[in-house]
């Protein structure tokens, strides 16, 4: 039976682990691990004995995958990290996503430039997934401001959803043997066609075990004032699907901005969804007043959760994997900022307090009960 809450925190200067009892009253910090280099993805694998995985992006020595079998007291490198085959013509720029598969030891990894890797031995060896790299659309994907990265992998049985900036949403229904673009209703603001077949700048996708077929997406919004080809494109940034991602519709009405990066759902209620809107030009909190916005009706309406957060003069960004939620009966939300604060909302985000206020810029936060 779980007796503690474990946080895995990827930052610009290495990887940190924090742990607390189930009351979440006193978190103790360990780290940094990974020689102080950037960590953009981490994974808490609790399918068997808990393991922590973290990517490590070393600008001189390349990509590494770190693993801990002692709940973050120490980390070792796996035998290999994802790498493009010789002659592929691409070189790995970053590891953006690590996710578990259906079988013990099975892992998936999304990288930049956008590609998918698969491991069946706990990350010791990796194989490039040709079905998405060889997709006819792949040669037309173009990097956006944040690069061309495969940052979201959602595994739902034999269904696999991929989120790619700026490739769009791709769906496999045969365990990754084949992928199809599934972007009906997802807008793009930077191409003449407001709703192209592919090429959208998806920021994050989540699903919920209690609502089969339903997904939520944070897309690149903020184009309501666009006066270029195709005209304004309001409310294209926060979306919902009820048919396994084959079609999408906007749920952005009521938010101060449809631009943002993270989106998470309550572990117990698929109608409860959280986003953190950002001002689209600066990618920071609108008006310098951060707020997490919550919907309790699947995106039909939204309410700001601000108690305990700064009321002004706070201009940070929360990255796409910078917000998470634990699975206790009364779940807590956590988000990490690009200015190094890690916040907790113990009562589902009604009230916020700062756990750590001077970490390096935070890229990602994951939580698990162990």
Image: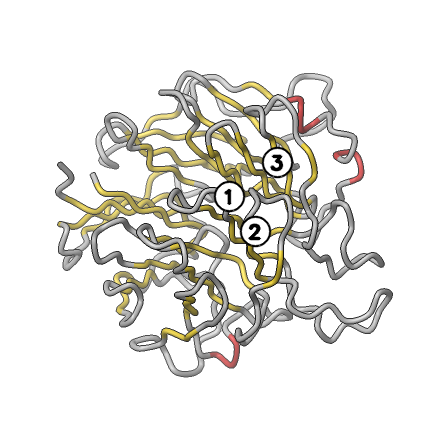
State the residue position of label 2: 241
Image quadrant assignment for residue 180 = top right
* N-terminal label among 1 and 3: 3
Relative side of 331 to 251, left or right: left
Q: Secondary structure at mark 2?
A: strand
Vertical order, 75 against 88 (above or below): below
State the residue position of label 3: 171
Which mark lies nearer to you, 1 or 3? 1
The residues tagged by marks 2 and 1 sit, at their Cα atoms, a distance apart of 7 Å
From the viewer's side, name the closer residue of 32 and 8: 8
Residue drawn at the location 64% of the way across and 68% of the way down: 235
From the viewer's side, name the closer residue of 153 and 241: 241
Q: How many marks?
A: 3
Q: Secondary structure at mark 1?
A: loop
From the viewer's side, name the closer residue of 245 and 154: 245
The residues tagged by marks 1 and 3 sit, at their Cα atoms, a distance apart of 12 Å
Where residue 63 appears, x then y in whole percent?
52, 31
Where residue 240 appears, x then y in whole percent?
55, 55
Vertical order, 84 against 206 (above or below): above
Where residue 185 appears, x then y in whole percent?
69, 54
* Label ID, residue 213: 1
Which mark lies nearer to you, 3 or 2? 2
The residues tagged by marks 3 and 2 sit, at their Cα atoms, a distance apart of 13 Å
Residue drawn at the location 47% of the way across and 68% of the way down: 316
Vertical order, 369 against 331 (above or below): above
Do residues under tags 2 and 1 come within 8 Å of each other at their CB atoms?
yes
């Amino acid at each position: 039976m779980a007796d503690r809450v474990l946080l895995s925190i990827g930052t610009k200067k290495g990887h940190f682990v924090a742990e607390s009892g189930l009351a979440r009253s006193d978190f103790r910090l360990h780290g940094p691990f990974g020689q102080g280099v950037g960590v953009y993805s981490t994974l808490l694998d609790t399918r068997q004995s808990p393991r922590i995985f973290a990517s490590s992006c070393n600008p001189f020595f390349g990509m590494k995958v770190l693993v801990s079998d002692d709940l973050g007291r120490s980390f070792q490198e796996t035998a290999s990290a994802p790498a493009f085959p010789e002659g592929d013509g691409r070189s790995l720029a970053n590891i953006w996503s690590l996710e578990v598969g259906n079988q013990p030891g099975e892992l998936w990894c999304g990288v930049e430039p956008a590609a998918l890797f698969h491991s069946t031995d706990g990350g010791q060896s990796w194989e490039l997934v040709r079905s998405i790299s060889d997709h006819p659309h792949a040669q037309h994907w173009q990097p956006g401001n944040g690069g061309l990265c495969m940052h979201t992998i959602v595994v739902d049985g034999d269904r696999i959803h991929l989120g790619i900036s700026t490739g769009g949403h791709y769906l496999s229904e045969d365990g990754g043997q084949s992928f199809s673009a599934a972007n009906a209703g997802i807008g793009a603001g930077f191409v003449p066609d407001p709703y192209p077949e592919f090429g959208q700048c998806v920021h994050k996708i989540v699903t919920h075990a209690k609502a089969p077929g339903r997904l939520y997406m944070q897309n690149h919004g903020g184009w309501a004032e666009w006066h270029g080809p195709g005209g304004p494109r309001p409310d294209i940034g926060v979306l919902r699907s009820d048919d396994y991602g084959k079609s999408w519709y906007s749920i952005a009405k009521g938010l101060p901005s449809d631009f943002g990066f993270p989106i998470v759902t309550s572990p117990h209620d698929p109608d409860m969804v959280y986003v953190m809107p950002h001002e689209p030009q600066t990618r920071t909190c609108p008006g310098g007043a951060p707020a997490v916005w919550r919907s309790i009706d699947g995106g039909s309406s939204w309410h700001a959760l601000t108690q305990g957060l700064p009321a002004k003069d706070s201009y940070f960004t929360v990255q796409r994997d910078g917000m998470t939620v634990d699975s206790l009966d009364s779940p807590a939300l956590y988000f990490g900022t690009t200015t190094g604060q890690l916040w907790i909302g113990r009562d589902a985000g009604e009230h916020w307090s700062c756990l750590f206020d001077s970490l390096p810029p935070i890229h990602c936060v994951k939580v698990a009960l162990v």
